[in-house]
Amino acid sequence: MEGIVQILIFLFLLILGYFSGSYLEKRHYKNIRARERKTHHVPIITFGAKQPIPEAQEAKLFVGSVVVSIDYFKRISATLRLLVGGRVTVYETLLDRGRREALLRMKEDAMAWGANQILNLRLETATIGGRSGDNNSLGSIEVIAYGTGVK
């Protein structure tokens, strides 16, 4: 009887994690899309080392960083996918949200300063922790976007 109760609690938490994680992810994407519409007029230009740099009155380095965590349902889903191989799509959305959020934070800071374009964007990612004692599992990712804002 105790085993059945534990299985039911596990299933309940799994379902709760799925629905709450899906809701929060959809809400975050909605927020990202709204903010992207507000910042789309500031172009991001990346060029090679031998190209001339555009003329600018002022330039400043801007950084946007974010840490996004994975929910338990996605962690379990990814673990099952790793057993059979193939694309781990639950992590793809995590990386997409992190990348877009970091870019937005960088662009919003640059726009507040008065930048009209951002040059040489770079993105860095890092994994942060996982379950205690298991450094191979993904717990959270950090995405850092940086570039030079110019006026």
Image (spheres, rainbow, N blue to C red):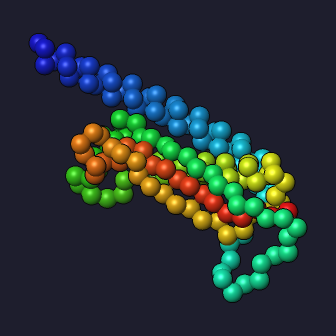
Find residue 42 and report its horizontal and vertical position in percent: 79, 58
Query: Outermost residue, top direction?
Result: 1
Specify whether 142 is left or right of 33. left
Find residue 106 and report its horizontal and vertical position in percent: 68, 53
x 68%, y 77%: residue: 47
Closer to the camera, 138 or 13? 138
Find residue 43 and report its horizontal and vertical position in percent: 76, 63
Residue 24 vertical placement versus 81 (above, below): above
x 27%, y 39%: residue: 132
Residue 124 vertical placement versus 33 (above, below): below
Closer to the camera, 139 or 19? 139
Query: Outermost residue, right direction?
Result: 57
Residue 47 vertical placement versus 10 (above, below): below
Residue 34 vertical placement versus 46 (above, below): above
Specify whether 39 is left or right of 85. right
Q: Quadrant of the C terminus?
A: bottom right
x 51%, y 44%: residue: 67
Answer whether residue 144 is visible to the viewer in this image. Answer: yes
Find residue 98 and report its horizontal and vertical position in percent: 54, 49
